[in-house]
Image (tube, rainbow, N blue to C red):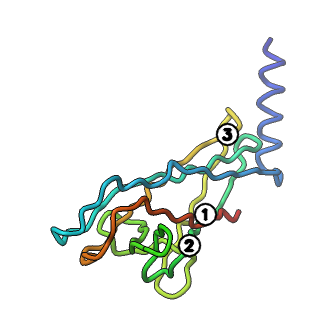
Amino acid sequence: MQRLILSLAAMLLATAGAQAALLCTVSTSGVAFGAFNPLPGQSADTTGTISVTCIGLPLSTASYTITIASGLGSFAARKMVSGSDNLDYNLYRDSAFTQVWGDGSGSTFTVTDSVTIPLSLSITTNYVVYSRIVSGQNTAKAHTYSDNPLITITY
């Protein structure tokens, strides 16, 4: 029994320094604003989640960057659409709605992180996506609006 434990510990130490093959995937909970009333002149805020799961050998390190494309609009004003109607919104890294989550170009930000794979061989890290429909869109019509910006993880 003691030899088995020592052999396992030696194997873990030997693989920790080796360049390990990693696999990282991304999934989302999505952002859902619900009903938005443009008449009071207030913004509508909500959150979503991006989850990154990395699988690899124990004690190996995964470094990655998460970007979000502009979707149907631009980074200055992403657009949700319903037919020919649209509603401006944006996605942010911070709860103060000051750092537009994008691809790092212009004044957009990305998320860069690093994780160490535990003995269970996988680790999941969650990131909050803050989202806001901007006020002043008093001509918005009652529709179901949508956008589908691409989320990319580079590791």
| Of the pair 129 and 138, the residue shown nearer to us | 138
Q: Earlier in the sequence, mark 3 or mark 1?
A: 3
Q: Which mark is residue 93?
A: none
Mark 1 or mark 2: which comes first in sequence? 2
* In-image side of 144 versus 120 (left or right): left
Residue 25 position in % (x across, y down)? 68, 51
CA distance for labels 1 and 2: 10 Å
Q: Residue at x 41, y 53 (%)?
A: 32
Question: Do the residues under discs 1 and 2 have CB atoms within 8 angstroms?
Answer: no
Position of residue 37 in the picture relative to residue 75 (left or right): left
Which residue is at a point 72% across and 44% down the rendered structure image? 55
Asked which secondary structure carries label 1, the reply is strand
- Residue beneath disc 1: 151
Q: Amino acid at mark 3?
A: Ser
| Res 150 quadrant in image | bottom right
How busy is the neighbourhood of tag 3: few (under 14 within 10 Å), some, or many (20 plus)?
Answer: some
Vertical order, 113 against 136 (above or below): above
Q: Is residue 68 above or below residue 57?
A: below
| Secondary structure beneath label 3 | strand
Residue closer to the observer: 108 or 18: 108
Choose between 53 and 129: the one closer to the eye.
129
Question: Mark 1 packing: few (<14 Cα in 10 Å), some, or many (20+)?
Answer: some
2 vs 3, front mark: 2
Three-letter amino acid code of the residue under disc 2: Gly
Q: CA distance from mark 3 to mark 1?
A: 21 Å
Relative vertical location of residue 126 with respect to residue 138 in this rendering, above or below: above
